[in-house]
Image: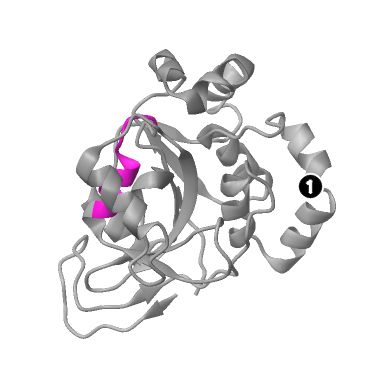
Amino acid sequence: MHVLPNKRTPTGQIGSVHIEHKVEHFQQRYYWDCGVSCIIMLLSNKQREDFLARFNEICEDEGFGESTWTIDLCYLLKRFHIKHCMYTILLGVNEDYRRHGYYDRIMHLDTQRVYSRFRDALDSGVQAVERSVSMKELVSHLTDRGPAIVLVDAGLLSCDLCKHNKLKAEFRRCFGSNYYRGHYVLLVGHTARRLLYRDPALSPRLCATAPRRLQQARLTSGTDHDIIFIYNSYR
């Protein structure tokens, strides 16, 4: 983690600092593996090689196939001994999300597995807490503890550096849309005015967005405010 302080700021507030957890970028290879790719960025070289060599075998063993929910990512993190904690406003499946085309095609396949994984989480050593996380808590975690995997509506998240999705996201924010597209990104730090993240949908690069834009993308209907705090050193 690189920290370049210019002045003292209260914990949980973005001040004149640059904090970045150094991870090796990994670009997703399929349409469905954004969350898994975020985890690959967190692995050691040996763990990454092992996972990629047995990718299909491990995904089949985990039971999620080509449809990963946040709780699935927690079990995968546990498999690789990465300390973490998931926060969500619903420890289960929101049946109302069937109206989203994104969920309608997968919910009937995944519901039983997702409920079972939440039910067995405590006994399996997976921590899932039913509440939303504030921006202050998120910034504090990035500053003091580690990265975070966050579920967003991809259509609402845009990068201020490479301008990826800029026009589409602005249009969505201005005019709205019922179309939801779930996507995971890895938050790795912050600067004075921006949150830094790695987007597995893109080639290797560091992206940045304003806190309010991230909030719009991660707190929209369909995300359940899902976020996973990672408690691992990347200094």
- Percent x, y of residue 173: 24, 45
* The N terminus - image quarter: bottom left
- Percent x, y of residue 235: 49, 75
Span shown in magenta: 213-222
Look at the image and tell me whether residue 137 can be seen. no
Secondary structure under tag 1 reads helix
Q: Quadrant of residue 187?
A: bottom left
Predominant secondary structure, magenta span: helix
User: Which class describes the residues within 10 Å of circle 1: few (<14), some (14-19), or many (20+)?
Assistant: few
Up/down of 146 relative to 225, above or below: below
- Percent x, y of residue 184: 49, 47
Up/down of 171 relative to 94, above or below: below
Instruction: Give the residue number, with chain letter if any, for mark 1.
Output: 55
Residue 221 within the segment the image draws in magenta: yes
For image coordinates 55% across by 61% down, the residue present is: 202
Look at the image and tell me whether residue 157 can be seen. yes
Residue 135 within the segment the image draws in magenta: no
